[in-house]
Amino acid sequence: MGNDTIDNMITAPRNAGSSKAETVRIPYTNTTISTGRIPVEEGFSENPREHREGTNRFPVPTLGYRGRVRKPRITTSRRISKPGLRIYPNSKDIPRVSGGTGTVIPPTPGGTTTDREARQKRIGGEVPRYVWR
């Protein structure tokens, strides 16, 4: 059984944000590196950097918070496509999350993009998870 790297990339910062952590370590894969720019562009995290421990590398995003009470920027996420039931909509059927305040990160044949970019380029792909503020 394999790991769902995009799902881990979203779930780890969400869980760390609920405990008010500053950073989170994510396993280093080509998918996490290419996907790592999207939460920064969407405003969910900031200042991504790479951490090394011996021969192991980890992308470490700095988690984003709002206000004095430090409310995490990723408040909710919902898994859509599951290992037993994959969801692959075409570009017209990629959902809009929470009226545009959220995002979907579909891995497409052209690389990992945001839902807006996928609709604009008319590329469909798997919908692993909805993420919103």
Image (cartoon, grey):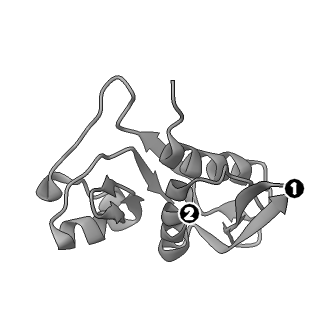
10 Å crowding of disc 1: few (<14), some (14-19), many (20+): few
Frontmost of labels 1 and 2 is 1
- In the foreground, 93 or 124: 124
State the residue lying farthest toward the right: 54
User: Which disc, if any, is residue 119?
Assistant: none
- In the foreground, 13 or 97: 13
13 relative to 124 in the view: left or right: right
- Picture coordinates of residue 88 (x, y %)? 22, 43
Residue that appears at 49% across and 49% down? 6
Kindly state the secondary structure of the residue where label 2 is placed.
helix
The amino acid type found where label 2 is placed reads Ile
Query: Where is mark 1, residue-wise?
Result: 54
Asked if disc 1 and disc 2 are in contact, CB closer than 8 Å, the reply is no
Label whose residue precedes the other's in the sequence (1 or 2)? 2
10 Å crowding of disc 2: few (<14), some (14-19), many (20+): some
- Picture coordinates of residue 133 (x, y %)? 51, 60
Query: Where is mark 2, residue-wise?
Result: 33
- Picture coordinates of residue 129 (x, y %)? 41, 46
Kindly state the secondary structure of the residue where label 1 is placed.
loop
- Picture coordinates of residue 38 (x, y %)? 48, 68
What is the distance, in whole Å, between disc 1 and disc 2 at their CAs? 19 Å
The quadrant holding residue 119 is bottom left
Residue that appears at 56% across and 63% down? 33
11 relative to 90 in the view: left or right: right
| Placement of 66 over or under 103, stated as above or below | below
